[in-house]
Amino acid sequence: MNILVTGGAGYIGSHTCVELLQAGHEVTVFDNLSNSKEESLRRVQEISGRSLFFSRGDLLKPADIEAVFQSQHFDAVIHFAALKAVGESVRQPLRYYQNNITGTINLCQVMAKFSCKNIVFSSSATVYGSPTIMPITEEFPLQALNPYGNTKIIMEQIFRDLVISDPTWNTIFLRYFNPIGAHPSGLIGEDPNGIPNNLVPYIAQVAVGKLPFLNVYGADYETPDGTGIRDYIHIMDLAKGHLKALEKLSNNPGAVAYNLGTGRGYSVFEVLRAFEKAAERPIPYHISPRRPGDSAICYANPTLANTELKWKAERTIDDMCVDTWNWQSHNPNGYD
Ligand code: NAD
Ligand code: WQD
């Protein structure tokens, strides 16, 4: 298939491009590089031994999107491009609504104009808010805790309405749990701007000596060791889920959501221990107050994706830490 990948230079997009190229698909990446570097795409091509086409453009400029669709016909779009920092979305809600929602509407308008109505869209477990019952199935009610989460809920609703208005659209929303890890080559990985917000990139920078210690945000939760529990999923397992979703598009699914998680949770301390083992060094930490907005436990029921997409996460928490460390230790400054 000929696939357009928006946000393909970013963390999840670049790893998915490797899988797409290795599976024989043609790939065009559309990205404004607002949170990524073109070097990631050079390395994607190095790993896969195949070339892709890169179009630098912005979803907020419909003419940029039209130019890509005029140049070739796409069978489907995988739509990663979005702003994703929760705290920033609280401080800059208009920027988040505009980039994520207006950008998606612009994309869909151009897709409709060029009769490409197949899309796999990056949603998030954040759409579930803070449920108290685990594991989370796709039927759980949706609830946003911040503007970023709201953009995901609104975009899912836009796709549902689009399918009602025109059933020839096929839209799959993949609700990712906590993606971590890197390609086993160590050539591509997560390259956050500034101080990382998320646990594993933060631990990785402590391990490599760029940050002094980890703040463990709360050790007084009602969990076995008191720290927060999440469903971490290896980025290559996540990438494979997108290829399975592309296959599913041909069955005319309408608008459907799938959880992509392992179905198993790990605490902050368990992740810390696994990373210490992978990096073969102690990782200093301090217990800090809980982070506002965090829930104690969050993990997926991935049964729907297992059965309908024939997809299952295979890699362990040790694989995730080994691959993160391989990337971080060989690229202490990311792609710079
Ligand atoms: P990322 O920031 O690494 O990648 C997003 C890419 O989109 C970047 O390369 C950025 O330059 C590009 N982009 C942003 N706005 C754009 C615009 N207007 N026009 C063109 N390109 C634009 O993020 P990621 O971690 O790879 O996340 C990919 C998707 O998955 C996002 O939609 C994100 O919300 C979602 N998601 C991520 C996580 C996570 O923990 N990483 C979890 C759940 C969902
Ligand atoms: C994991 C655990 C923290 C950092 C976020 C977004 C979510 C989604 C994925 C996009 C929690 C603890 C963290 C640190 C810590 N993104 N922690 N010290 O919060 O589950 O999800 O990323 O859709 O929307 O909210 O992930 O990695 O930030 O936190 O103790 O320095 O690690 O309290 O228990 P989270 P995370």
Image (cartoon, grey):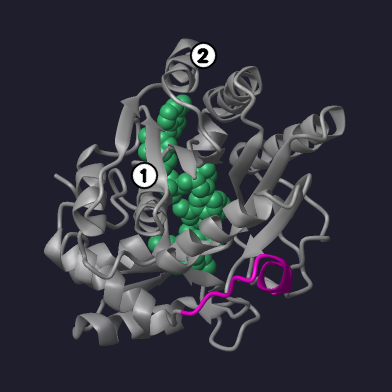
Q: Is residue 158 left or right of residue 25?
A: right
* Residue at 83%, 60% in the rendered image: 139
Residue 275 visible, this angle: yes
Nearer to me, 234 or 92: 234
* Residue at 64%, 44% in the rendered image: 149
> In 3D space, how far apart are the residues under numbered discs 2 and 1 (Cα atoms)?
21 Å
- The span shown in magenta is 303-314
Q: Is mark 1 within 8 Å of ligand 1?
A: yes
Q: Is residue 171 left or right of residue 83?
A: right
* Residue at 39%, 41% in the rendered image: 27
Amino acid at dot 2? Pro
Amino acid at dot 1? Gly
Q: Is residue 77 left or right of residue 204?
A: right
**Residue on which disc 1 sits:** 10
Q: Is residue 306 magenta?
A: yes
Nearer to me, 109 or 74: 74
Disc marking residue 62: 2
